[in-house]
Image (cartoon, rainbow, N blue to C red):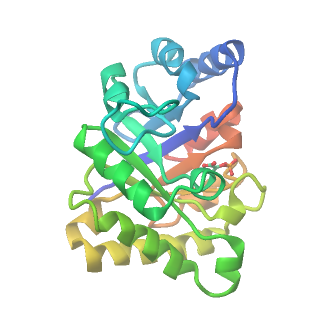
C-alpha cells in the first residue's frame, strides 16, 4: 500500500503575528509537489492558529501542538479536542518529547489524549523516541515499543495516526540520526505494528522522522524505505522548509 509522504512543521513556542505572516507568504508562494504526492501540515502556537489558518494556502493544513485528554471544561490553560475540531483543524501533535520530558506527560496521559482526540475526529501526529542514555544503554527499541504499546492499549484504529519517530538526542541539537539509524528504528516500529496491531496497520501507517532535519540532510533520509516523511522543528521556521517538502519527489 502506498503511503503518502507527510511533512509537518512544528513551530513550537515561536513566532509573532508578523513573522508568521512572512513565513506563510513564503509557503504560499512555494512550488511543491501536489497533494497526491505530499501532505503538508504546519503547527503554529495555539494563539496564532486562526490567523495562520486564514492566510495559509488550502492545500496545506494546520495542526495544533497539544490538546487536553478529555472533554473540555474546568481545565485552565488547556485546549480541548472539541475546540480544535470546531476550528476545522485536521491534526494535533501529541507525545512530543518536550511535553513528555519538560512537561512530564506520562505515556498513559498521552495515550488518553490521543484516544480522545481520535474520538473527536482529529488526526494525530504521535511522537515517540528514546533519550541518548537509553540509546547508549541499548534500550532504543524497548523505549519506542513501550511508547507504542501505551497507545495500542488505548486505541484499535490507527488509520488517523501518523507516528513520528523523534530521537530526543536529535531534537534541536543539530545531531541528526543517520539514514541507517532512522531506518533501523522505523523498520522495527513497523514490525512492532505488524505483530501487535495488524499487518494492515503496519503497511498503511506513516512513520515519519524528526530530529534536526534540514534541507541538506532530508534527501538521504527520504530514500529509506520506511521513512514516510518528516516532522521538522527549527528548519520549519525558515524558507528551507520548502526544500524539505520537495524531498517527497
Ligand atoms: C521537533 O521538535 O519536532 C523537531 C524535530 O525539532 P528540530 O527539527 O528542531 O530538531
Return the residue found at the far bottom: 138
Q: How many marks?
A: 0
Give the residue at x 21% y 72%.
198
Q: Is residue 182 left or right of residue 91?
A: right
Residue 187 visible (yes or no): no
Rendered-image quadrant of the N terminus = bottom left
Residue 162 point in image, percent of width and height? 39, 52
Give the vertical position of 38 relative to 95 (above or below): above
Return the residue found at the far right: 174
Give the vertical position of 151 relative to 27 (above or below): below
Give the vertical position of 169 relative to 91 (above or below): below
Give the residue at x 63% y 51%.
98
Quadrant position of residue 207: bottom left
Q: Is residue 165 left or right of residue 176?
A: left
Residue 231 point in image, percent of width and height? 55, 48
Say which of 138 and 1 sits in front.
138
Quadrant position of residue 117: top left
Say which of 206 and 130 sits in front.
130
Say which of 233 and 83 sits in front.
83
Give the residue at x 35% y 63%.
151
Say which of 59 and 130 sits in front.
130
Residue 24 point in image, percent of width and height? 59, 19
Residue 229 visible (yes or no): yes
Residue 108 point in image, percent of width and height? 41, 62
Amino acid at each position: 500500500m502506498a503511503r503518502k509522504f507527510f511533512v509537518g512543521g512544528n513551530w513550537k513556542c515561536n513566532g509573532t503575528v508578523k513573522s508568521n505572516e512572512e513565513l506563510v507568504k513564503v509557503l504560499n508562494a512555494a512550488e511543491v509537489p501536489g497533494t497526491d504526492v505530499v501532505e503538508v501540515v504546519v503547527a503554529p502556537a495555539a494563539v496564532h492558529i486562526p490567523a495562520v489558518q486564514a492566510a495559509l494556502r488550502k492545500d496545506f493544513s494546520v495542526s495544533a501542538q497539544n490538546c487536553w485528554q478529555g472533554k473540555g471544561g474546568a481545565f485552565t490553560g488547556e485546549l480541548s479536542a472539541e475546540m480544535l475540531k470546531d476550528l476545522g483543524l485536521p491534526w494535533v501533535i501529541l507525545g512530543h518529547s518536550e511535553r513528555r520530558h519538560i512537561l512530564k506527560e506520562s505515556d498513559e496521559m498521552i495515550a488518553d489524549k490521543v484516544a480522545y482526540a481520535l474520538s473527536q475526529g482529529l488526526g494525530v501526529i504521535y511522537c515517540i523516541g528514546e533519550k541518548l542514555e537509553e540509546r547508549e544503554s541499548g534500550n532504543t527499541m524497548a523505549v519506542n515499543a513501550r511508547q507504542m504499546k501505551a497507545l495500542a492499549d488505548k486505541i484499535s484504529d490507527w488509520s488517523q495516526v501518523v507516528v513520528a519517530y523523534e530521537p530526543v538526542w536529535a531534537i534541536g541539537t543539530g545531531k541528526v540520526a543517520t539514514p541507517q539509524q532512522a531506518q533501523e528504528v522505523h523498520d522495527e516500529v513497523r514490525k512492532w505494528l505488524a505483530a501487535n496491531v495488524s499487518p494492515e496497520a503496519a503497511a498503511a501507517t506513516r512513520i515519519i522522522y524528526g530530529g534536526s532535519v534540514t534541507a541538506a540532510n532530508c534527501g538521504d533520509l527520504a530514500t529509506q524505505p520506511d521513512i514516510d516523511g518528516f516532522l521538522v522543528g527549527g528548519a520549519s521556521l525558515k524558507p528551507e522548509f520548502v526544500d524539505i517538502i520537495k524531498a517527497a519527489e
